[in-house]
Every structure is written in structure tokens, then in C-alpha cells.
Image: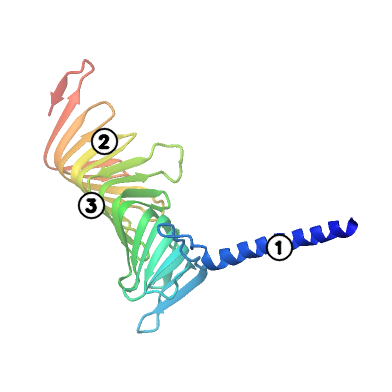
């Protein structure tokens, strides 16, 4: 009896092993491959550290750029966590961004998202898109940009500047805020214009164009164009020269109209030029022209 049971168990084991072997054989040789059409998975890319420097024919460094990339051998290198240095004259400007592309043949850098350019003297440009052309020492953007230096903040749509941000031009919708460095709690001077605006940080002057309006606690001054000069030492506004349809309005509502005006901040003096007219209001609200 025991012998018969053992024979049955052996036969059952052989039969079961045969079934398993057949299934493996069938699956290996006859099973249809699963289609991956429409569900293709790209091969994984390895991320490399990219670092590159370019020099002029005279041997001067023109640009350094580094970041993380998966295509360092391509003509256009796609970058993440970008750090670039654009050289002009004696000092570089350092630019950081989340993303960017470097075109090796065109020698052009395109950056986007959280772009910050900082010069060695502390001038900072902030924007979401920036094009850098190192051989021409130019940086520019078509989107909203902001430049901060000392107590002066400038912002507008579209900006074009040299690599050291010594001269920056804003295209349109410009706002300039000048805070008194000696009194951060005081009301700043705010100047707006339709644009363009050219700021020359070396010469401490800003040229405003089209529908200019300057205002602070002392009143408002509007004109077609305005040149604003800054004192290099105190960083305060030293002089304003307004031209074309100039209107000055004080907090009481009194107004003066003239062809041009020179305002000397240190003396608190206003010099009217061309045809001038004043409009004063009495206590009862009636106006008196002169």
C-alpha cells in the first residue's frame, strides 16, 4: 500500500513539472510582444556638469558659463541652475537663472526664470527672461525688468543694457522710485513715463520721455520730457529739467504752467522758462490767474 502511494506521488510530481515546463516554453517562444506604440518611454538622460569659457582674439575672457546639462555635446546646450559671467572692461557681471540655453556657434546665451544679474558695484537686474550677447557686451529682455542700485529702483517693460549695467534703457511703462537714503521712512520721489527711459549710472542722470510725471510730498510736476540728475555722493535728486507742457501742482492745488522748468533741489528753487502762467486758489476755492 505504501509503495503504491509513493508511485502515485512521484507520477503527480512529474505531471505537474511537465505542465510548468510547457507553460514556460510556450510563453518564451509564442507569446506576442506587448505593443508600446503611443507609450514609448524615452531613454533616461544622464545629467552632466557643463562648464565653458570663451575668449576674444586678443585673449581677453568674454564669457564663462556653467550649469547642469544632459546634452553638453550639442550645438545648443540646454542648462539648469545656470551661473554665467559676462566680461566687459575690467569687471564681470554675474548672472544666475533656473534655466537657459547656450548657442555655441552664435555665442548667445538665453536665460529664463528667476534671472538675476549682479555687477561688482552692487547694481542688480531682475527679470524672467534675458538674452546675453557676450561679443557685443549686451544684455536685453522684452519682458518686465527691474534694476536696483543704491536707493534708486527702476522698472518697466523691456530693457537693454551693457554688460556692466552702466547704461540701461527701458522701453515703456517706466516707474522710478528714489528713496531718501538718510530717511527710509519718508515718502519717496516717484517718477513715471510712457518711455523710453535711458539711465546713465556713470553720469548720474536719467532721461525720461513721453508723459512724464514726478511726485512726492511737495507736489507734482508733469511734462513731455524730463532729465533728472542725481548727486553722486548723497544719491539724492539734485536737479530736474522738464520740457514741454510743464505743469507744477502743489498740495494746495495751486498750479503753474510753462514751456520748461529747472528745479534745483538743494535750494528748493524753481525756474520757469518760456511762456508761464500761474493759477492760485483762494480759501473759498475761487481761482486767481496771473
Q: Quadrant of the C terminus?
A: top left
In this view of the protein, can residue 168 be seen by the observer?
A: no
267 shown above or below 167:
above
Residue matched to label 3:
196
Q: Which residue is mark 1?
A: 17
Within 10 angstroms of label 1, few (less than 14), some, or many (20 or more) residues?
few
Point out which mark residue 238 bears: none
Neighbour tally class for label 3: few under 14, some 14-19, many 20 plus, Cα within 10 Å:
some
Q: Earlier in the sequence, mark 2 or mark 1?
A: 1
Percent of width and height locating residue 224:
17, 45
Please name the residue shown 41% across and 44% down the image.
180
**Which of the two discs, 3 and 2, sits closer to the camera?**
3
Q: Viewer-proximal residue, 4 or 19?
A: 4
Snapshot quadrant of residue 95: bottom left
> Where residue 148 appears, x then y in whole percent?
40, 52
- Nearer-N-terminus badge (3/2): 3
Secondary element type, mark 1: helix
Badge 3 element: loop
Using residue 232 as the reference point, say whether residue 174 is left or right of it.
Answer: left
Residue sitting at the far right: 2
Closer to us: mark 2 or mark 1? 1
Let me know if residue 281 appears in the view.
yes
Label 2, label 1: how many angstroms apart (C-alpha)? Answer: 98 Å
Mark 2 packing: few (<14 Cα in 10 Å), some, or many (20+)?
A: some
Tell me: 101 left or right of 242: right
Residue bearing mark 2: 220
Q: In the image, what residue occupies the spot 35% across and 59% down?
A: 130
Amino acid at each position: 500500500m505504501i509503495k503504491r502511494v509513493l508511485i502515485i506521488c512521484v507520477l503527480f510530481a512529474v505531471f505537474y513539472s511537465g505542465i510548468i515546463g510547457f507553460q514556460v516554453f510556450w510563453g518564451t517562444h509564442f507569446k506576442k510582444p506587448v505593443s508600446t506604440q503611443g507609450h514609448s518611454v524615452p531613454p533616461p538622460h544622464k545629467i552632466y556638469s557643463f562648464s565653458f569659457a570663451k575668449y576674444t582674439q586678443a585673449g581677453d575672457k568674454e564669457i564663462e558659463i556653467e550649469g547642469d546639462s544632459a546634452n553638453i555635446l550639442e550645438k545648443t546646450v540646454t542648462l539648469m541652475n545656470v551661473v554665467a559671467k559676462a566680461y566687459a572692461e575690467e569687471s564681470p557681471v554675474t548672472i544666475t537663472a533656473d534655466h537657459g540655453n547656450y548657442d555655441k556657434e552664435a555665442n548667445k546665451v538665453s536665460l529664463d526664470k528667476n534671472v538675476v544679474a549682479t555687477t561688482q558695484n552692487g547694481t542688480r537686474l531682475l527679470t524672467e527672461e534675458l538674452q546675453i550677447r557676450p561679443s557685443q557686451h549686451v544684455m536685453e529682455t522684452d519682458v518686465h525688468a527691474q534694476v536696483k542700485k543704491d536707493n534708486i529702483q527702476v522698472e518697466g517693460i523691456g530693457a537693454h543694457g551693457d554688460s556692466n549695467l552702466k547704461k540701461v534703457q527701458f522701453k515703456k511703462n517706466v516707474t522710478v522710485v528714489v528713496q531718501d537714503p538718510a530717511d527710509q521712512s519718508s515718502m519717496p520721489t516717484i517718477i513715471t513715463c510712457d518711455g523710453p527711459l535711458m539711465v546713465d549710472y556713470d553720469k548720474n542722470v536719467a532721461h525720461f520721455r513721453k508723459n512724464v510725471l514726478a511726485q512726492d510730498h511737495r507736489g507734482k510736476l508733469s511734462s513731455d520730457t524730463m532729465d533728472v540728475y542725481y548727486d553722486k555722493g548723497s544719491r539724492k535728486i539734485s536737479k530736474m529739467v522738464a520740457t514741454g507742457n510743464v505743469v507744477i501742482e502743489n498740495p494746495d492745488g495751486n498750479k503753474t504752467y510753462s514751456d520748461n522748468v529747472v528745479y534745483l533741489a538743494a535750494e528748493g528753487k524753481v525756474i520757469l522758462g518760456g511762456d508761464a502762467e500761474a493759477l492760485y486758489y483762494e480759501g473759498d476755492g475761487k481761482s486767481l490767474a496771473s
